[in-house]
Image: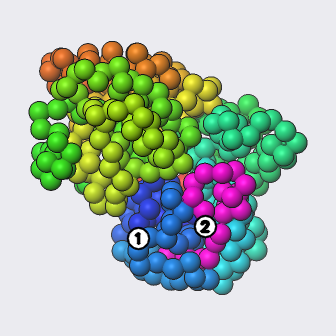
Amino acid sequence: MRILFLSDNFPPESNAPATRLWEHATRWVKAGHAVTVITCAPNFPEGHLYDGYQNAWRQVEDLQGIRVVRVKTYITANEGFIKRTLDYMSFMLMGFFFGLFERRPDVVVATSPQFFCAVGGWALAVAKWRPFVFELRDLWPASIMAVGAMKKSLLIRFLEQVELFLYRRAKRIISVTESFRKDLINRGITPDKIVVVRNGVDLNRYQPQARDAELVTRYTLQGKFVAGYIGTHGMAHALPKVLEAAELLRERTDIVFFFAGSGAERGTVERLVQEKGLHNVRLIPRQPKEHMPALWSVCDVSLVPLRDNPVFSTVIPSKIFESMGMGVPILMSLPEGEATRIIQADEVGICVPPENPQAMADAIIELADSAETMARYRTNALTAAQNYSRERLAKEMLTLLRQAAD
């Protein structure tokens, strides 16, 4: 089968959409399928080209058997609605145009969270007379309003109509959460075309390991209980509230907070750490994807915060699966929903109310002071990770693509 996939994020970028596609596509190639990914030059989230890349009109490379076509786009940092929209629209247009020159596939797939990418995928599927599959990673534009970037307006209503248009035109919608599926059904989308394939973890890479000695030394983590936030520092993540929890725990010299990543709120995090004199916070810049297991290895607990908005009760942060694979207990701070139910059902950590620094601080103390509780959560995390194996999930999604192509 020939699969043509549009995604504006792909390795060496290491965010959730790039990781999911990479871990699926490499397995599809090993199974004998031809995969072409149309993407842009890597620049997320800072809006700066990665070393060794140019923002050229068209670049083709082979990554472990995946044909990767990188197209020229308007590049900007992951902040500012207008600039980001221009970025998204430029990829939609360029991805569609250069996709026309690719060999006719059996199926065209495009991914969110923003749906301009999906518009390009749908148009390309129409031009090539092939079925279109929409991989739904986020309820966009609802998430725009959830982070306060825009309010309900004529523009938002127009975007919602485009969103529904894409759902209706897709032969198959592959949602990453059951909550998204229910939302679409409530909005009149045919239930039979929506299937859930959750995010997961590559258990060949993410597994328990000794603390990375170099990181421990460089960031003075010897003998410390490390509460780690690893990932995009975005508007949705309520990171200033996490820093308030760090401020509440500044007298606990055995507890440190470890922030690794970048994004729209990274500057705010750095400024607040300096202003508050938070010597119990360690800041590390975004790291290459291959360094992720080493970062997880120094964490005793994984912090998973989101803002207090009902939209975020529908999401499942993908970092929880990597945490499980590494045997790292989870401290989740977001509205009750599908993600909190996973943590509670699998008994892999603690859930506290979103944007509640005191509750987060109390939970960290509880974990730091109870070796028995930590050991139980670690064991449960490793057991639960087997249910989210990327190997199994890639096969599930491949089956759905085959069905769509028939």
**Magenta segment: does it hold 8?**
no
Q: Residues within 10 Å of mark 2 (few under 14, many from 20)?
A: many
Q: Nearer the viewer, residue 241 or 179?
A: 241
- The C terminus, quarter of image: bottom right
Q: Which residue is found at the position 17% from the left and 39% from the top?
A: 221
Q: Is residue 13 visible?
A: yes
Residue mark closest to the camera, 1 vs 2: 2
Q: Which residue is found at the position 18% from the left and 17% from the top?
A: 369
> In screen coordinates, is 37 left or right of 118?
left
> In screen coordinates, is 59 left or right of 360?
right
Q: Nearer the viewer, residue 29 or 37?
A: 37
Q: How is the image coloured?
A: rainbow
Residue at the disc numbered 2: 75
Q: What whole-number distance in Å separates the C-alpha atoms at marks 1 and 2?
A: 30 Å
Residue at the disc numbered 1: 29
Of pointers 1 and 2, the one earlier in the residue sequence? 1
Q: Element under label 1?
A: helix
Q: Is residue 383 visible?
A: no
Q: Element under label 2?
A: loop
Q: Which residue is found at the position 72% from the left and 71% from the top?
A: 93
Q: Position of residue 303 (x, y in %)?
A: 37, 32
Q: Position of residue 60 (x, y in %)?
A: 50, 83
State the extent of the magenta-drawn residues as a range. 68-88
